[in-house]
Image: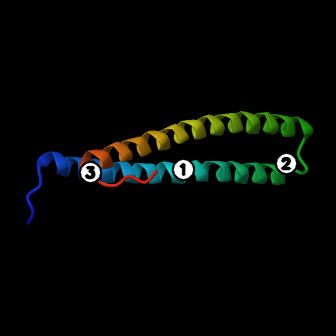
Amino acid sequence: MSACKPEKETLRTQLSEANQRSRMYAQRFWQLPFAYISVVGITLAAADKSDPKFIRLGAITLCLMGVFIFWIMIGTFRAIDKSVKVIEKTESDLGLPTFV
């Protein structure tokens, strides 16, 4: 077995964790809009013969949900960016080649 410094082993663990997080954030980033589009489609299909008052209320609700989803996506994009920066720094600290 090769003897690694505890610091390098910690950096490798950090690199692995940051990689997993960036993948999770990327999945979430693409799942959110498709889930929202699905909810809109189901709502429009259900509102076909509803009372116009409920259709307006549903439209307002979907609009607010859309703004909320967009806000979450911005936060997710920032998290992806942060985790990629951590990956690049950790790779640099370990002396690994970085791909930009």
Question: Disc 2 or 3, which lies upstream in sequence?
Answer: 2
- The span from disc 3 to disc 1 (Cα, nearest Å) is 30 Å
Q: Is residue 52 left or right of residue 43?
A: right
Residue 50's x, y, as percent?
Answer: 88, 46
Residue 46's x, y, as percent?
Answer: 81, 52
On screen, residue 22 above or below 51: below
State the residue position of label 1: 28
- The span from disc 2 to disc 1 (Cα, nearest Å) is 28 Å
Question: Disc 2 or 1, which lies upstream in sequence?
Answer: 1
Residue at left offset 54%, top offset 36%: 75
Question: What numbered label is drawn on residue 95?
Answer: 3
Look at the numbered discs 2 and 3 and tell me whether their residues touch, using CB distance below 8 Å: no
State the residue position of label 2: 47
Choose top left, top right, bottom left or bottom right for residue 68.
top right
Residue at left offset 46%, top offset 52%: 24
Q: The disc labelled 1 sits on which kind of residue? A: Arg
Residue 89's x, y, as percent?
Answer: 34, 42
Image quarter (top left, top right, bottom left or bottom right) of the N terminus:
bottom left
Residue 30's x, y, as percent?
Answer: 60, 52
Question: Disc 3 or 1, which lies upstream in sequence?
Answer: 1
Q: Please name whichever residue, 18 or 57, is drawn nearer the observer in this view of the structure.
A: 18
Crowding near pointer 2: few (<14 within 10 Å), some, many (20+)?
some
- The span from disc 2 to disc 3 (Cα, nearest Å) is 58 Å
Q: The disc labelled 2 sits on which kind of residue? A: Ala
Q: Secondary structure at mark 1?
A: helix
